[in-house]
Image: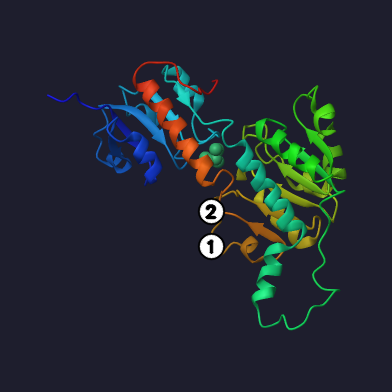
Amino acid sequence: MPEELPAVIADGPLDDTVLEFMAGQVSLVPWDTLDTGLTLQIEGLYTYGHPRVDSALLDRFPKLRIISNYGVGVDHIDLRAAEERGIPVGNTPDILNGATADQAMTLVLATGRRLIEGDGYARSPDFTAYDPGHMLGREIHGATIGIIGLGRIGQEIAKRAHGFGMTILYHNRRPRADAQSLWGAVWRTLPDLLEHADYVVLSCPLTPETHHLIDEKALRLMKPTATLVNVARGGVVDTDALTTALKEGWIQSAGLDVTEPEPLPRNHELLNFKNVVLAPHLGSATVQTRRAMAQLSVSNLLHGLAGQPLIRQVRY
Ligand code: DGY
């Protein structure tokens, strides 16, 4: 008799790479099994698209041994509930730092140089002649970037900003001893950073402390010529306050890889603003990085199912 494969529930649909790594290793149980109540045999929980994982959900899985998350951010998982049940949580840090930092710089460049507006204009019948006075942007080189969250991704952003010849400010709970020597990055208090940065880039995790960190008060501190870029989580920014800020000119523009809610309602005002560049949560979305994330998250899953230490385990 073939050995029975461990039952793993996953939200999906999962992409082909994840399925390829899981093939022959687990028996996948579809998410809508939750509606039928047949969850007693489930040993693994694989979170792919940020489903909410709380005590009520975990109580449905008495045999659960591992939660493996496809991605580094685990704000959708109640870590205390997992800890109380002795269930390890795996995630995919580090391998996505470069891709996410690239996306942050993409948004800095696209907002600063009005790339999406320019693309629309270049394709439209309105573009009939080159006009040197038209659609001027703001420089990136020589500008000041303020990175909020100089963690693994934030450091990669600092490295890139240094290459662009930007002045680098950052805000972290604690200053980093090597940030100045590596990238000339200078720690500032949050208000000070907001007042001085031309590009404020968010790369911090979403926690109770960072929820709506960028609210009306914070936005009012920013320069009217400044841009806000968010590659962290939508919840770090108060969307209503940001909408007002962009409408009333407290700041100049925004580049948002993430929003709250996500996606924004299809009739949300922000979707019509020319001074906003939006991406559908593409921070780590490259072929190479997503493959590495699939491999690591499935390895974490298999290690957890086998009762072995995870390759990358979240600290509770
Ligand atoms: C992450 O890694 O947290 C990304 O947002 C994808 O989940």
Can I make out residue 65 in this image?
no
| Numbered disc 2: secondary structure | loop
Q: Around disc 1, counting alpha carbons within 10 Å, would you say few (fewer than 14), some (14 to 19), or many (20 or more)?
A: few
* The disc label shown at residue 266, or none: 1
Q: What mark, if any, has residue 295 been given in the picture? A: none
Q: Nearer the viewer, residue 231 or 233?
A: 231
Place of residue 14 in the rendered image (x, y in percent of width and height, measured from the top left): 38, 44
The residue tagged 2 is 263
Foreground of the two, 178 or 151? 178
Q: Residue at x 47, y 40 (%)?
A: 291
List x then y, in percent, for residue 175: 80, 25
On the image, which quarter does residue 25 sit in?
top left
Mark 2 and mark 1 residues within 8 Å of each other at the beta carbon: yes
Q: Is residue 132 visible?
A: yes
The front one of 300 and 76 is 300
Quarter containing ligand 1? top right
Q: Does dot 1 land on a helix, a strand or a loop? A: loop
In percent of the image, x 73 and y 51: which residue is there? 108
**Label 2 C-beta lies within 8 Å of the nearest ligand 1 atom:** no
Figure quadrant of the C terminus: top right
Callout 2 amino acid: Pro
Hey, which residue is sitting farthest left in the picture?
1
- Seen in the picture, residue 163 relative to 272 is either above or below; the reply is above
